[in-house]
Amino acid sequence: PDGIVPFEMQREAAHDVLDNALSSFGERLKGFFVNNRADRIHLTDVFLPYWVFDVTARISRTRIETREGTLYTQAKHNTRRDEFGDGLNNVLYCAVESPSRQLTSKLSTYDLSTVKAYTPKLLANKTAELYSIDYQQASINTRSKISEAFRFKHGHDPHGDSQTLISALIQNMSFRLLLLPVWVVNIIEEDNDIRVG
């Protein structure tokens, strides 16, 4: 790994967050339909490997204004095209298959200014996963997320009288491997169902 983000949330604080989630209105509502009460809870602190990409791209923005004339049945279009460069930093992609992508894709808020240079002593008394997705596969898998981020950033809107269409041609991707802190919880319910979060 190129670096590691230390744990800031201690076990007691993680337990408090979990207790609040388990006593939320949504959990109580689900309890009317299924037996989701926790019997045993296992909370584990683990470092997960993430590929972190910095990206530069060529952005193509097309603006189309459609005006419906009262004397004409055919719409008149006014089209304007722009091209310019842009970039994104610190695009995260979890480098393991388990926990599932559905869970790890929600873990995208990290303060990467706290990254420390990797040394084995920073892993003392902690579990760390080895990456199972290499950077090449991760760079391919994350391109749709990157394109979506550029579209959002530049106002992609294909509907209405004024349309803005954004496309991004990725020109360069640099990467580094970071270990990021995650609290993983396994909840074994009274009916022996298992939830991972």
Image (tube, rainbow, N blue to C red):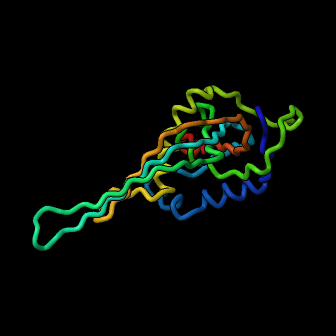
Q: Position of residue 62 (x, y in %)?
A: 37, 54
> Residue, x 56% and y 27% (percent of image)?
137
> Residue, x 61% and y 44% (percent of image)?
91
Is any part of residue 159 visible from this angle?
A: no
Q: In the figure, is residue 4 to the left or right of 140?
A: right
Query: Which of the two residues, 60 or 161, is positioned nearer the viewer here?
Result: 60
Residue 8 drawn above or below residue 130: below
> Residue, x 28% and y 61% (percent of image)?
78
Quarter holding residue 97: top right
Q: Position of residue 15 (x, y in %)?
A: 72, 54
Residue 132 drawn above or below residue 82: above
- The C terminus: image quadrant: top right
Q: Residue furthest right?
A: 121
- The N terminus: image quadrant: top right
Residue 76 drawn above or below residue 116: below
Q: Residue furthest bottom?
A: 70
Quarter holding residue 115: top right
Query: Which of the two residues, 37 or 89, is positioned nearer the viewer here?
Result: 89
Q: In the figure, is residue 142 to the left or right of 131?
A: left
Q: Position of residue 28 (x, y in %)?
A: 52, 61
Residue 140 drawn above or below residue 148: above
Is any part of residue 62 visible from this angle?
A: yes
> Residue, x 46% and y 52% (percent of image)?
151
Q: Position of residue 176 (x, y in %)?
A: 70, 35
Q: In the figure, is residue 45 to the left or right of 92?
A: right
Query: Which of the two residues, 86 or 49, is positioned nearer the viewer here?
Result: 86
Q: In the figure, is residue 90 to the left or right of 192?
A: right
Tally of numbered tags: 0
